[in-house]
Image (cartoon, rainbow, N blue to C red):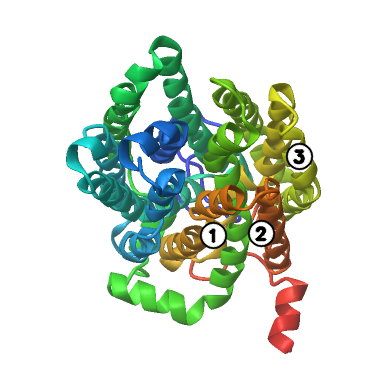
Amino acid sequence: MTTKTATAGDAPGLPDPETPEGKRLLRKAIGASAIGNATEWYDYGVYAATATYLTQAFFPGDLGTIGTMLGFAVSFALRPLGGMVWGPIGDRIGRKAVLAMTIMLISIATALIGVLPTHAVAGVWAPILLIVLRVVQGFSTGGEYGGAATFMAEYAPDKKRGKYGSFLEFGTLAGFVLGTAFVLVLELNLTDDQMQTWGWRIPFFFALPLGLVGLYLRNQMEDTPVFREMEQKGEIEGTAWTRFVDLLRDYRRPIIIMFGMVIALNVANYTLLAYLPTYLKNTIGLEGNDSTVTMLIGQLVMMALIPFVGRLSDRTGRKPMWWVSLIGLFVFALPMFWLMGQGFVWAIIGFVVLGVLYIPQLATISATFPAMFPTQVRYAGFAISYNVATAAFGGTAPLVNDAVVENNDGWDLFPAGYMMIACAIGMVALLFLRETAGCSIRGTEIPGEETDAEKALTNA
């Protein structure tokens, strides 16, 4: 295998993107990382697109849509625990072994939803079993995303981390689009009665072959060059518990900074990608497949932009991209949500505008967040910070939005206001974020230089 000699900032053994062998290895790393994200978000895409069918199948009583949104939100309840378990293990035994386990748990739990009995058959056990599978999926995802992002970041050359890391988020949207498109194809070819009785089950089964492909790709890779370098130097010591204790004792500041940024990131994410199909149908009143078509068009536009924005962040830095996104969403959230209420075409325009403004955050996650922690606690730091914030604010966003909109007349624009508050929190956290574009992420020190805000806080 051809690798380049270590230069400033690059770990020994990093694949050289200028050689055929290096390009091949980077493509394998991208595929191995992104397939898990695609599988995770395929589940979310199917769940969101089949929400009305799931409501009738599992929550036919007074709970209704709130029950379905609760089923979505509860999968996030175990994500912090998953991060606390999988993250330190990944920092101790390596990224690859943990990622092989998480992708199979996610795909199996998703596929089993397709065989669950409905409320009419099993009574209260039907929603209970659904919730159990969502919890398993959430626990597994707690280790999946942080590990996949860490894996990709530690394989990518330092000066191209934004470019290569963006493909992980391309996988996010690809999975969501695949799930949404699958449901749309079924809706166009089956009757409403067929979709309600058995058609909604079919997309969930497809998660299993996705997981098997991901497992194969991950088993073909070595662990990351950055992690292997630490192992060779004998700097991976102690137990997984040691990694967890070190993280909480020595790295509270990056944990808090990431927490604030993830609030902004995932309130926008789950409002736009998970809640919006329900919002467009139930609140805006789009008919037939119009809401699904709206989502697909917007998501395809977002997918097309992700690689370009990731590459741009390598030149401009991560922080400018986040400032553009946070300020843009803060300014345009209210007018675009109002615009979506004016009809089908306006809904497409409103969603596309908000999706495009969201992309500078989404495209740079895998380049920004892993670089906030040193190697020995990177997996745990990312997984715990990200998943605690996501569980508290991201995964609950559809539930909160639906509860407020459904129970308060005249609050149709509440999702926009919720996004604005989250963006304001993100902007405060962003002041303390270190710029790490082009920086090395190897070694046992936090990458990047202290910001003025950090220095002021330290001296206060």
Q: The residue under label 1 is which amino acid type?
A: Phe
Nearer to us in this view, 51 or 168: 51
> Are the residues flagged by discs 1 and 2 in contact, CB closer than 8 Å?
yes
In the rendered structure, which disc, 2 or 3, sits on the residue that comes first in sequence? 3
Nearer to us in this view, 65 or 8: 65
Residue at 57% in and 32% down: 281
Nearer to us in this view, 300 or 98: 300
What is the CA distance from the residue labelled 1 to the residue labelled 2?
Answer: 9 Å
- Residue 202, visible in the rendered structure: no
Q: Is residue 228 above or below residue 222?
A: below
User: Residue at label 3?
Assistant: 338
What is the CA distance from the residue labelled 2 to the residue labelled 3?
Answer: 19 Å
- Quadrant hosting residue 289: top right
In front of the other: label 2 or label 3?
A: 3
The reply, left or right, for residue 16 in relation to residue 348 is left
Residue 422 bears which disc, if any? 2
Counting from the top left corner in percent of width and height, residue 26 is at 47, 36
The reply, left or right, for residue 59 in relation to residue 45 is left
In the rendered structure, which disc, 1 or 3, sits on the residue that comes first in sequence? 3
Q: Is residue 32 above or below residue 267?
A: above
Crowding at dot 2, Cα within 10 Å, few <14 / some 14-19 / many 20+, comes out as many
Q: The residue under label 3 is which amino acid type?
A: Trp
The reply, left or right, for residue 10 in relation to residue 145 is right
User: Residue at label 1?
Assistant: 393
